[in-house]
Amino acid sequence: MEEEKRAQIRAQSVLMKDNPYERFSKCDLMLRDELAIDRTILANERTLLSYLRGSMALIIAGATFVHFIEFGMLRHIGMALVPIGLATGAIGVVKYRRMDRRIRAIRKSIARNPEKD
């Protein structure tokens, strides 16, 4: 009996690498669990918007420096800010999409595989 419990714990730890919620019983999920997933989705969207806001600020600052300053160090800084802003936006989108896929996979696995007792 002790060996079976150890095997179950090992199996659960392997599953947790893919989905951290696998250890919870699917039947025990309640409204608060669904709401927690919704809050996580909203937080992920807020994070994306923050990345995009910062990216736009960098691009606009860089374009302003390039447009209004004809020579000097600030013009070079402006030229550097535009690609940095583009990279920041791209990183934000990549992180958002990666996390969104994980969240939606967890939600699908919870809805699709109800545990039968």
Image: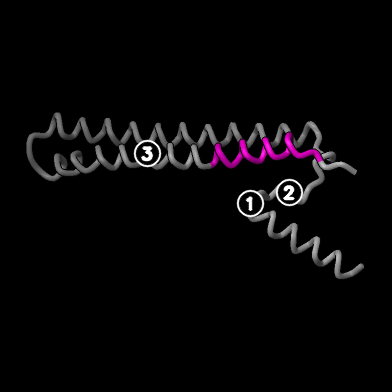
Q: Which residue is mark 1?
A: 18
At label 3, the amino acid type is: Ala
The percent position of residue 9, horizontal first and vertical second, equals 78, 62
At label 1, the amino acid type is: Asp
Q: Identify the magenta region.
A: 99-114
Q: Which residue is mark 3?
A: 90
Q: Is residue 19 above or below residue 52?
A: below
Q: Who's the residue at 80% across and 65% down the image? A: 7
Viewer-nearest residue: 81 or 97 = 97
Q: Who's the residue at 24% across and 37% down the image? A: 82
Horizontal relation, residue 55 to residue 108: left or right: left
Horizontal relation, residue 1 to residue 41: left or right: right
Sequence-first disc among 2 and 3 = 2
Horizontal relation, residue 105 to residue 11: left or right: left
**For the view shown, which residue lies furthest in the bottom direction?**
3
**Residue 74 occupies quadrant:** top left
Q: Is residue 17 above or below residue 117?
A: below
Does the CB distance between marks 1 and 2 fall below 8 Å?
Answer: yes
Does the CB distance between marks 2 and 3 fall below 8 Å?
Answer: no
Q: Which residue is mark 2?
A: 22
Q: Who's the residue at 73% across and 33% down the image? A: 34
Q: CA distance from mark 3 to mark 1?
A: 25 Å
Magenta stretch secondary structure, dominant: helix
Q: Is residue 7 above or below residue 70?
A: below
Horizontal relation, residue 90 to residue 40: left or right: left
Circle 3: element type: helix
